Amino acid sequence: MRLAINGRNIDITQALKDYVEEKIGRITKHYDHIINIEVTLGVTKNRSVHDNHFAEATVFLNGAKIHVHEVAESMYACIDIIADKLDRQVKKHKDKMLKSKTGAGSIRTESIDLAEETEPTPEEDIVDINIDDREE
């Protein structure tokens, strides 16, 4: 896995790099098929903007791409939030991939199982109707 950290209108210090590596590194514990992670940290230089720090991350998985963007008052808060969002989305992607491989939750397999259970037995198919014994 390759982790690329870029900055817009901000100098990326070693402390920020270490913090990003620590928080984003949690994702690799959940899913092994991560190819590349690109993190962009930045500051909006406008006094009228209250939440002027932003962080965005793009995770390239085997067969998918997950993108997260967050704005907050401090850079560390942005990093925490995107790490949590990525963590949830990577877990969701992993569960989806596991379900598709095992076939769990498939409509086709569930309908076959239900059809096998609901087939009537030969005793249930036979209904005796006697026309001669009708009451008038």
Image (cartoon, rainbow, N blue to C red):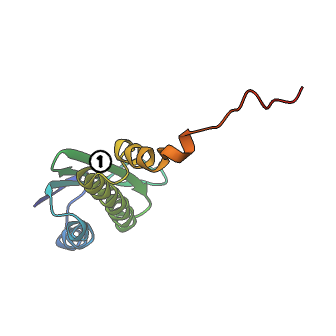
Q: Which residue is mark 1?
A: 67
Determine the residue located farthest toward the left in the rendered image: 2
Q: Amino acid at mark 1?
A: His
**Looking at this view, is 117 or 123 the one in front?**
123
| Label 1 Cα crowd, 10 Å radius (few <14 / some 14-19 / many 20+) | some
Residue 125, image x and y in percent? Answer: 54, 39
Q: Residue at x 62, y 38 (%)?
A: 127
Residue at left 53%, top 46%? 123
Q: Secondary structure at mark 1?
A: strand
Q: Is residue 48 visible?
A: no
Left or right: residue 89 compared with residue 50: left
Q: Is residue 134 visible?
A: yes
What x and y, as percent, mark residue 87? 32, 63
| Residue 6 in picture, x, y percent from top left | 18, 54
In the displayed structure image, the side of residue 84 where residue 7 appears, left or right: left
95 or 62, nearer to the observer: 95
In this view of the protein, which residue sits in the foreground, 93 or 113?
A: 113
